[in-house]
Image (cartoon, helix red, strand yellow):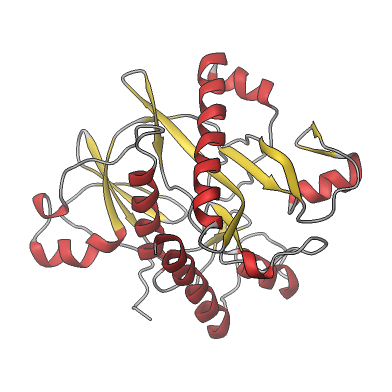
Amino acid sequence: MSKALYESSIDSLPLAFRGKVRDVYDLGAELLIVTSDRLSAFDVILPTPIPDKGRVLTALSRFWFDRTTELVPNQISPRKLTEILPPDQAAELEPRSQIVRKAQALQVECVVRGYLVGSGWAEYQEKGTVCGIELPPGLEQASRLPEPIFTPSTKAPIGEHDENISFDQAVELLGTAHAEQVRDLSLRIYDHGARWAEQRGIIIADTKFEFGVIDGEIILIDEVLTPDSSRFWPKSEYRTGISPPSFDKQYVRDYLSESGWKKEPPAPELPAEVVAKTSEKYRQALEQLTK
């Protein structure tokens, strides 16, 4: 297990901001994104890093950005890290870094759900809907939906919770053309990724995408189909009626839910065994999806 990185420090570059997971440096027309090993759960940044997490998220995002270029343009710049940093520093940060074009981020998270689980399952039990979308009766927890559904949400600041919104509300925020475009792109990318993953023994139960605009063109930004942005289930252990075991941070969420923590800052430190198991799950997802 590699040494964990909680925060990056690049004195030669201006730090634009630190997000929940990523440290972002301003390069002028571009940004340098360094993905740390920080983990956010229930919209709170945990004090315990997960070794290799930043490397896995970066490698998987690069993989999916490359695989989806025919579906949608993306943020990736051809510029190399060695062009802006000394060789030793570039070599150290390269496995967890991406240089990206600056884009105007759309203020909606584009969630696609292919299975009935999590908050969607809770709503379905009460109302027979997920984010207001009516579903057939008789579905069980973790049931595969008749077809994937698009359920956008707000993008909350750090420490606040995202909120599900209707498609009509997304139209109010983005305009009809952009809302329809990101909906269609999200469903298309999810379908592509889910088919690829299932052939490699992983079910992508749900995921979220983020999009931005450069010169009027919608592009894919942030991260793509990673254990942080998606719910990954091992196909061999999938069954309905339960919340299946996962390759993603749901393992940490489950631990925190059972720990008695009230899901408000400050978050507790994670035990060593939870850290090690989570790191293993992230690495296993990368290995299976990219083989």
Q: Nearer the viewer, residue 25 or 198?
A: 198
Number of numbered discs visible in the structure rendering: 0
* Quarter of the image where one finds residue 171: top right
Location of residue 70 in the rendering, given as x and y in whole percent from the top left corner: 36, 34
Q: Nearer the viewer, residue 61 or 174?
A: 61
The residue under the point 39% across, 67% down is: 6
Looking at the picture, does residue 4 appear above or below residue 64? below
The residue under the point 89% across, 39% down is: 127
Q: Does residue 291 appear to the left or right of 277 in the view shown? A: left
Picture quarter with the C terminus:
bottom left
Looking at the picture, does residue 117 appear above or below residue 169? below
Location of residue 222 in the rendering, given as x and y in whole percent from the top left corner: 41, 44
* View extreme (bottom): residue: 273
The residue under the point 47% across, 54% down is: 20
Q: Does residue 162 appear to the left or right of 116 in the view shown? A: left
* View extreme (front): residue: 199
* View extreme (top): residue: 176
Location of residue 190 in the rendering, given as x and y in whole percent from the top left corner: 54, 42
Looking at the picture, does residue 31 appear above or below residue 271? above
Picture quarter with the N terminus:
bottom left
Q: Nearer the viewer, residue 283 or 1?
A: 283
* Quarter of the image where one finds residue 252: bottom right
Q: Does residue 92 appear to the left or right of 44 in the view shown? A: left
Q: Does residue 261 appear to the left or right of 9 in the view shown? A: right
